[in-house]
């Protein structure tokens, strides 16, 4: 059985450190935007909800985007999160 090189595995799966990093950054930014907008819906919380929404968005989006980037290319990850943002904001 033939052993695959790292380059061959990356070509087939889309996995690379760059795509993981791109996924983490794209996910963090996308979810921070969504969390900030959603958390800032009420003026009565004086920005606390918005800060919490941004912080949770960075954590959840960063981890989720990194995991998504493990098996997808940077372009696929960007397209996925663009769809997520479009579905949230209509």
Image: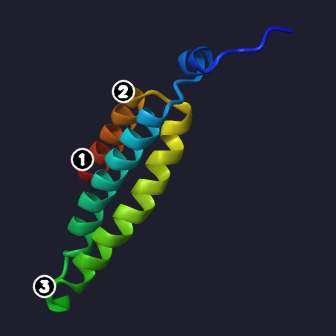
Q: Residues within 10 Å of mark 2 (few under 14, many from 20)?
A: few
**Tag on residue 1?**
none
**Residue 16 image position (x, y, % from top left):** 50, 31
- Residue under numbered circle 1: 90
User: Where, by quadrant of the figure, is residue 15 drawn?
Assistant: top right
Q: Residues within 10 Å of mark 3 (few under 14, many from 20)?
A: few
**68 above or below 53?**
above
State the residue at coordinates (52%, 24%).
14
The residues bearing labels 1 and 2 have C-alpha atoms spaced at a distance of: 22 Å
Q: Are marks 3 and 1 in contact (CB under 8 Å)?
A: no
User: Where, by quadrant of the figure, is residue 9 drawn?
Assistant: top right
Q: Earlier in the sequence, mark 1 or mark 2?
A: 2
Give the colour scheme of this rendering: rainbow
**6 above or below 18?**
above
Horizontally, is 48 left or right of 8 in the view?
A: left
- Residue under numbered circle 3: 43
Q: Residues within 10 Å of mark 1 (few under 14, many from 20)?
A: few
**Residue 80 image position (x, y, % from top left):** 39, 36
**Front one among 35 and 59:** 59
State the residue at coordinates (26%, 74%).
39
**Tag on residue 75?**
2
**Residue 49 image position (x, y, % from top left):** 26, 81
The residues bearing labels 3 and 2 have C-alpha atoms spaced at a distance of: 37 Å
Q: Earlier in the sequence, mark 3 or mark 1?
A: 3
Q: Are marks 1 and 2 in contact (CB under 8 Å)?
A: no
Judged from the image, the secondary structure of the residue bearing numbered disc 2 is helix
């Amino acid at each position: 059985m033939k052993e695959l090189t790292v380059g061959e595995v990356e070509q087939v799966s889309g996995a690379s450190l760059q795509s993981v990093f791109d996924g983490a950054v794209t996910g963090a930014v996308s979810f921070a935007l969504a969390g900030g907008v959603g958390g800032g819906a009420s003026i009565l919380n004086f920005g606390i909800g918005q800060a919490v929404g941004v912080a949770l968005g960075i954590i959840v989006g960063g981890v989720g985007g990194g995991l998504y980037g493990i098996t997808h290319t940077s372009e696929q990850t960007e397209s996925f999160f663009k769809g997520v943002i479009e579905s949230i904001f209509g």
